[in-house]
Image (cartoon, helix red, strand yellow):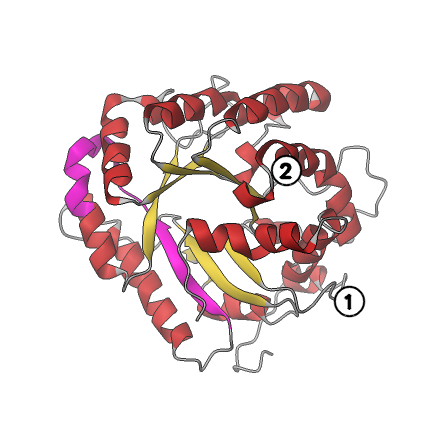
Amino acid sequence: MSRFGFSGGGEHAAWLDRVIEPIIDPDRPIIDAHHHLWMRDGSPYLFPELLEDLETGHNVVATVFAECHSMYRSRGPEAMRPVGETEFVAGVAAMSDSGQFGRTRACAAMFGAVDLGLGAAAEPVLAAHVAASGGRFRGIRASTCWHADQKMHRVVSDEGVLVRDASREVFSVLERVRLVLDVWVYHTQLREVMTLADALPDLSIVLDHFGTPILGGPYRGQRDAVFAAWNADICELAKRPNVTIKLGALPIRTADSTADRNLPPTSAEVEAAWRPWFDAAVAAFGCNRAMFESNFPVHKNWCGYSVHWNACKRLSAGFSEYDKDALFRGTAQRVYQINLD
């Protein structure tokens, strides 16, 4: 039970608790640049569950809520229904800002959603998000993952959504009003992000989840080929100064891992699985254009919150203090304009 009276539990929580590690570098300030809050299939990850993870030992000073189709309005104009998510998150953030739930500024910044088909008509929706957020709304996410293989999970029904004219009109509004665009695509779509970054050079674009290299499905057993293709496009994308990258949400065990699969992974295992991708991404973008993310509770399916951040600290162990601070705090604070005073 947490000190706020919330109690976790369940078989999965008990499984995660089978690996408990000392906290590495416990005083380092962290901004968790990407997490969700939701009720899915009767399983909550709401403020109490987030607080339980925040209490596991790392110095998380603030978090950024990432849109996830959570708590949309059930009535009213269709275009305005995503504003319900912002209203919900603003309430959680207000609770956190009361100081009664610990030192972390939960949901200090957030990004939401608009229908990309609205084109320029999305501007009133964006204004409604800003008004509902209590000053915390920083932009939207375009989740446009698509692949020709029908067995792949498709977030959108057609290819090329990110670079359609209507989407470009939405993003032009973002650029004009100085809001941020988070982008979730597969590694096979990274050239679409390049096209967008070139077309709107003053738009701040954040690439989520390392650019989501596909390591299963049609690419199963082709890890080296996927890495080579991903790395080439990541290096090319990094030439666009208006793009930053989030480091997280990769698979956490390699196919040749000999670890006991009955136990959750250790931070050393996560480090080993992520090392080549991390080194390549940071070499391309630099620490001032990269930030760590947890992607919880999605990532909680595979490891605990404290283990995740220990893995990030292992990955960056040889870096200068300046670069570590950028990865864990500084880049996210700048991109999402987070006031920690």
* 2 and 1 marks in contact (CB < 8 Å): no
Q: Quadrant of residue 179?
A: top left
Q: For the residue labelled by badge 2, is the local secondary structure a helix, a strand or a loop?
A: helix
Q: Which mark is residue 22?
A: 1
Q: Name the residue at 15% across, 46% down.
A: 124
Name the foreground residue: 1 vs 85.
85
Q: Position of residue 309 (x, y in %)?
A: 66, 57
**Sequence order check, earlier mark of 2 and 1:** 1
In this rendering, does residue 159 appear at all? yes
Q: Look at the image and say whether residue 267 sits in the magenta stretch.
A: no
**Residues under labels 2 and 1: Cα distance?**
26 Å
From where the camera sits, is residue 41 visible?
no
Relative to 196, is 112 above or below? Answer: below
Closer to us: 56 or 206: 206
- The percent coordinates of residue 336 (x first, y second) are 41, 52
The quadrant of the rendering that contains the N terminus is bottom right
The amino acid type, in three-letter code, at marker 2 is: Val
Packing grade of label 2 (10 A; few <14, some 14-19, many >=20) is some
Write the residue at 83% across / 48% down. Answer: 260
Q: Amino acid at mark 1?
A: Pro
Q: Position of residue 29 (x, y in %)?
A: 59, 64
112 is within the stretch colored magenta: yes
Span colored in magenta? 104-125
Residue lying furthest right: 258
Q: Which mark is residue 282?
A: 2
Mark 1 is surrounded, within 10 Å at the Cα level, by few (under 14), some (14 to 19) or many (20 or more) other residues, namely few
Q: Nearer the viewer, mark 2 or mark 1?
A: 2
Displayed quadrant of residue 206: top left
Q: Residue 122, position in %: x, y?
A: 19, 39
User: Split into 4 quadrants, where in the image is the C terminus?
Assistant: bottom left
